Amino acid sequence: MTLKGVITVIRVPFLILALILALLGAAVAWYEARLFGSPFYFGYALLATFGLLVAHSAVNIFNDYFDERSGLDYKTRRTPFSGGSGAALTGLLRGDQVLWLGLACLVILIPIAVFFVVKSGVMLLPLLVMAVLLIVFYTPVILKTPWPEWSPGLGLGILPVLGAYFVHTGGYSLNAFIASMPSFFLVHNLLLLNEFPDAEVDVTVGRRTLPITAGKKKAAYFFSFFTVLVYLWIAGAVFCRYMPVYTLVSFVTLPLAFKVIKGSFRYDEREVFLKAMGQNVFLILAVQALIAVGYIAGGLLGRGT
């Protein structure tokens, strides 16, 4: 097992998403601490961030392991955003080493989970159990059911934000759930758009992603609907006073969102579509980061509504 192989299989650039999700959850908790006097622990935020990085690494590792075992990696034409890391395919790691690395990530997560359950409350446990189930069963099971994109939206969108919030407050709130929903839509769309180039190969191993079950054109419409829904959700939440008005700063990304929507329908033009995939990654990271900035501004300047 080489360091290069480990770095490749965990897909380090993709871990930026976990960092931003941790930031968002912590920002919501900090915002409420400033306005309502609820608790906030900086050390907990750092530990939760580390845990999310390890959990996201585990997702990437198990996805690679199952794809290599199924033979999918040997059929897929990889892109910078899809098709797996290629660590096992290129000989950087053996298949069994990939599996053991994934299991090691789960082992690392155990003491972190126990610490937060003891310190913050047992109601964190259902969230953690759900997260582990999504990590382990996503590739071998969930991807073979209709509309599997909900799973990353939940597991790499809603749950991390709620978890990062819970460790401070010892509970969940409607405000935190509302703050996490844009992450659901965005991470759902991250996986959805990245599935387009692999659809013809994915179907050979029994996957049932939206580009396969609905067709690419309908999947592009679905992608577009969820993209627009992100902004409608934020605007509605601000109007109903569930999110601080400063989160509307995320609307500066609207021009890019429309470019990505337009690009999603050009799935038959590889270079154009690859550009849209890259823009989509930036959009997803930027919107969530700006929402977090909006919460931090709300904590510093007041609710703003």
Image: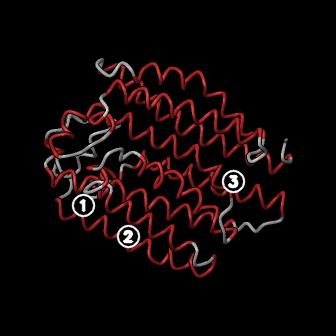
Q: Which residue is mark 2?
A: 106
Horizontal side of 220 relative to 29 (left or right) equals left
Horizontal side of 154 relative to 3 (left or right) equals right
Write the residue at 66% across / 34% down: 250
Horizontal side of 205 relative to 211 (left or right) equals left
- For label 1, the SS is helix
Q: Which residue is mark 3?
A: 27
Say above or below: 95 vs 81: below
- Which numbered marker is on residue 215? none
Quadrant of res 5:
bottom left
Write the residue at 29% across / 65% down: 101
Please identify the quadrant where the N terminus is shown. bottom left
Q: Which residue is mark 1?
A: 98
Which numbered disc flags the more N-terminal residue, 1 or 3? 3
Say above or below: 6 vs 41: above
Which numbered disc flags the more N-terminal residue, 2 or 3? 3
- Residue 84 spot, x, y in % from top left: 28, 45
| Residue farthest bottom in this picture | 118
